[in-house]
Image (tube, grey):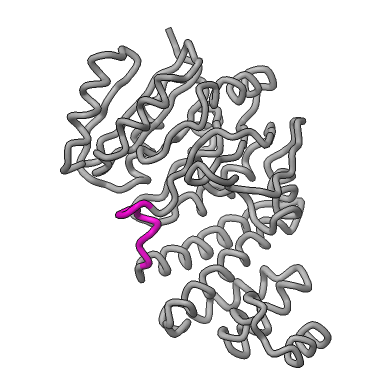
Amino acid sequence: MKPLLSIIIPVYNIEAYIGQCLESVFKQELSDYEVICVNDGATDKSQNIIETYVSRHSNLHCITQPNGGLSDARNTGIANAQGDYVFFLDGDDTLATTNALQQPLNLCIQNNLDLFVGNAIVNGAYPYLSNYPTQNKVISGENMMELFFQHNHTIIEPVWCYLYKKEFLDKYQLRFKKGILHEDILFTPKTLFQAQRCMCKDYTIVNYRWQRPGAITSEKTIKSLFDRRDTGRDLYTWFSRKKTVTDTPYQIIFSIYIELIYSIVKAKLKPNRILESADYTIMRQCVHTSHDKKCYRLIYINPNLMVHYLDNTLPIAFRKIVNHFF
């Protein structure tokens, strides 16, 4: 019988965490689900730990493949998922409660949602998004992007806050770009834009383990900066071909560049090592608010000024000039 939910867990060298992750999954108050662990070429004892759970749970399946990265592992999970809905759980995180998935799944089924977005808790201590725009009605994904951006100047990017309709992912061929870091930053805006039936609710799904030792996102590498730059470019090209109702997709792209430049400056690198003239053109095209205009003009003068402006460390007199004339 076809399961209602497929839980996809990529696994790579997380022997210290995968047991806790699977324990949280099999404590769920769910009756009709499958779990797909994708062993992405792990070289530690992760596979052995998974096999102990396979022997006890008939709804747990393990797929082993050569190391291809997180995106490749998630794509393999999607290709093998049989559930009506799909949920992505990182193998070093845990589900927050024993009914973390039941309520979101019920809402998905009752409202025929393309996707549901909830919240998470970070290191068991504080919400991933504290200013959550609770909205218990069905809206389009583009309107949902606008809703979140109005409240937080960002959207919820991590896929472990979402449940996705499998048919929806397949219809629009929504998959993760292989070989990049921060793949959610590219995947989530595209997915939201394509979705017509969405619902958001400030409901905690995952306990996110932030910056564990060895985590991909804790590595401040040059590749990370180039990948975020390329993500901004990819999204701009993609959205330029679409008919957008709001300016929000372009505001999201501009925010990606702002965070990128912030990271470049903090890493004491020269922006021109990462950015090219095409990136400044994209930024200029994506400016839609007075705040973004200030940031762009400061970047044009000197990216360090933009960082000081965001950190509120500009001299008072200069900040007044920026606020008045920029």
Q: 102 or 68: which is nearer to us?
A: 102
Name the image quarter holding residue 256.
Answer: bottom right
Q: Is residue 13 above or below residue 166?
A: below
Q: What residue appears at the point 43 percent right and 27 percent down from the top-left corner?
A: 7
Q: Is residue 260 left or right of residue 214?
A: right
Q: Is residue 185 above or below residue 96?
A: below
**Picture quarter with the N terminus:** top left
Span highlighted in magenta in the image: 212-220
Q: Is residue 32 above or below residue 151?
A: above
Q: Magenta span has 83?
A: no
Q: What residue appears at the point 74 percent right and 31 percent down from the top-left corner?
A: 138
From the top left corner, tell me how far across and down residue 171 is, in percent. Answer: 53, 32
Q: What residue appears at the point 37 percent right and 32 percent down from the top-left corner?
A: 21
- Count all numbered tags in the image, as a single digit: 0
Residue sticking out furthest to the bottom? 317
From the top left corner, tell me how far across and down residue 211 is, in percent. Answer: 40, 54
From the top left corner, tell me how far across and down residue 142 is, in percent. Answer: 70, 46
Q: Is residue 146 left or right of residue 24?
A: right
Q: What residue appears at the point 25 percent right and 35 percent down from the top-left corner?
A: 39
**Principal secondary structure, stretch drawn in magenta:** loop
Residue sticking out furthest to the top? 1
Name the image quarter holding residue 24.
Answer: top left
Q: Is residue 54 above or below residue 321?
A: above
Residue sticking out furthest to the front? 125
**Picture quarter with the C terminus:** bottom right
Q: Is residue 61 left or right of residue 109?
A: left
From the top left corner, tell me how far across and down residue 220 is, in percent. Answer: 38, 67
Q: 217 or 300: which is nearer to us?
A: 217
Q: Magenta span has 214?
A: yes
